Image (cartoon, rainbow, N blue to C red):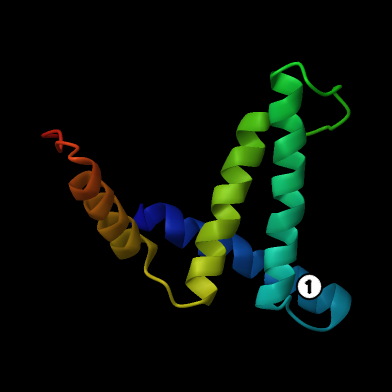
Amino acid sequence: MKEIIERSTAIREAYHKLEEANHGSRWSIEEDLLALSNDIGNLQRLVMTRQGRYYDETPYKLESKLAENIWWLLELAERLDVDMVTEMEAFLADKEHQLRVEKKNS
């Protein structure tokens, strides 16, 4: 997971350079969140299309849009100084305890 976060951060840094070159500044956290919101809308259409409840109008693939949404969440966490590895471990442990889910030995 740490390698994925590092790679995500490097990609976001490359996008920041494009933003600075084209707009004079990096996107704000709020603009990143807006981009995530837009991608969630695209994901919703792709899921509906997969379920036969919407027509195929988007050039995106469901699988890559799911990954992109995770990427945005990782980037937002990074910009907000949230340690996602620690938070995911705590979240999962809490839910396992709450729902009495046994941990599988890896």
Q: In the picture, residue 62 is in which quadrant?
A: top right
Position of the C terminus, as image quadrant, is top left
Label 1 residue SS: helix
Most extreme residue toward the top is: 52
- Residue type beneath disc 1: Glu
- Please state if 31 lies on the left or on the right of 64 as rendered: right
Q: Looking at the image, which residue is at 73% across and 78% down?
A: 26
* Whether residue 80 is situated above or below residue 56 in the rendered picture: below
Q: In the picture, residue 23 is in which quadrant?
A: bottom right
Q: Looking at the image, which residue is at 82% across and 76% down?
A: 21
Q: Looking at the image, which residue is at 33% across and 63% down?
A: 87
Q: Residues within 10 Å of mark 1 (few under 14, many from 20)?
A: some
Most extreme residue toward the left is: 105
Marker count (numbered):
1
User: In the image, residue 49 lies at what x, y percent?
Assistant: 76, 23
* Whether residue 39 is situated above or below residue 30 in the rendered picture: above
User: In the image, residue 17 lies at what x, y percent?
Assistant: 72, 73
- Please state if 91 lies on the left or on the right of 32 as rendered: left
* Whether residue 100 is situated above or below residue 35 in the rendered picture: above
Residue of label 1: 19
Q: Nearer the viewer, residue 15 or 97?
A: 97
Q: Nearer the viewer, residue 50 or 28?
A: 50
User: In the image, residue 27 lies at what x, y percent?
Assistant: 73, 75
* Whether residue 55 is situated above or below residue 68 in the rendered picture: above
Q: Looking at the image, which residue is at 55% across and 58% down?
A: 73
Q: Nearer the viewer, residue 97 or 38?
A: 97
Q: Nearer the viewer, residue 27 or 12?
A: 27
User: In the image, residue 38 lies at what x, y percent?
Assistant: 77, 53
